[in-house]
Image (spheres, rainbow, N blue to C red):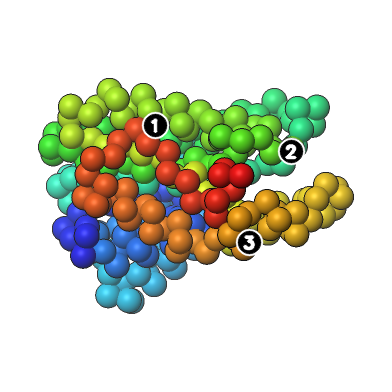
Amino acid sequence: MLLENKVALVTGGARGQGASHARHLADEGARVIVTDVLDDEGKATAEKIVDGGGLAEYVRLDVRDTAQWASVTEDIAVRWGAIDVLVNNAGICELSTVEETSDEEWHDVLDTNAGGVFRGCRAVVPIMKRNGGGTIVNTASVQAIRGTFGYLAYQTSKAAVLGITRSVALTHSYDNIRVNAIAPSVVDTAMFEKEMEHFKQNELFSFDDWLSAQPISRIAKPEEVSKMVIFLASDLSSYSTGGIFTVDGGLLAG
């Protein structure tokens, strides 16, 4: 029970990695607020956690909306007394080159993936300061560190997440707020299936190409990423802030 009596907010928590993070946080004793714009799936995720003996609820939150961030976080702080953990997980992925990327796609990806992290940090930092501290875990990607064909807007947005992470970590270390980022590689989610279908249709490269680049030659399970989230959200990582923690099967070591 590494997070007993802690209040944790997870964005993009309806499915995939976010749902896995929410379940693992609850398993460690946290009261979890699952947020997303996928209402039915978000409610189902929260209900599954409750049915399993955990504490969870679903709240609608569009991470691109500043007013929603303010309303949701202040409501949580009033009802539960704090926000101890924020997991900025919400994100979208568009697969296009610089020639193919439209202004609309560029702004949508950047505003969701990087803007959502920025707004999340901005909303919870004052609450964490009032309560003596907290932890923030931002979702970046190995693509923030190494290049990948055809992910222009996505890769740019995840690089921005690293900058936000370092800046907020350094600025608020004296407020007892730790901020770190995870950088997963390929994870077995619906988003990855969408990526593979795109590559297949465009004859770019195959699933076997992905595996050949991984020293651990398989894709990650969502729960393997969630275990890193638990480490960073809990006191197990009490001396870590401003860090980038890879969950990549050794990809960046090659």
Residue reaching furthest front? 254
Which residue is found at the position 47% from the left and 32% from the top? 161
For the residues marked 3 and 1, what is the alpha-carbon distance in whole angstroms?
Answer: 29 Å
Q: Which residue is mark 1?
A: 165
Left or right for 64, reference 155: left
Q: Position of residue 180 (x, y in %)?
A: 36, 39
- The amino acid at mark 3 is Ser
Left or right for 177, reference 198: left
Which of the image's four quarters has the N terminus?
A: bottom left
- Depth check: give the residue in front, 199 or 83: 199
Whether label 3 touches label 1, CB < 8 Å: no
Q: Position of residue 160 (x, y in %)?
A: 51, 28
Q: Residues within 10 Å of mark 3 (few under 14, many from 20)?
A: some
Which residue is found at the position 41% from the left and 58% from the top? 226
Residue 130 visible in this rendered orientation of the protein:
yes
Q: Which residue is mark 3?
A: 217
The residue tagged with tag 2: helix, strand or loop?
loop
Which residue is found at the position 39% from the left and 72% from the top? 48
Which of the image's four quarters has the C terminus?
A: top right
- Depth check: give the residue in front, 240 or 66: 240
Q: Position of residue 31 (x, y in %)?
A: 25, 59
- The amino acid at mark 2 is Phe
Viewer-nearest of discs 3 and 2? 3
- The amino acid at mark 1 is Thr
Which residue is found at the position 28% from the left and 39% from the top? 240
Q: Residues within 10 Å of mark 1 (few under 14, many from 20)?
A: many
For the residues marked 3 and 2, what is the alpha-carbon distance in whole angstroms?
Answer: 20 Å
Residue 191 visible in this rendered orientation of the protein:
no
Q: Which residue is mark 2?
A: 149
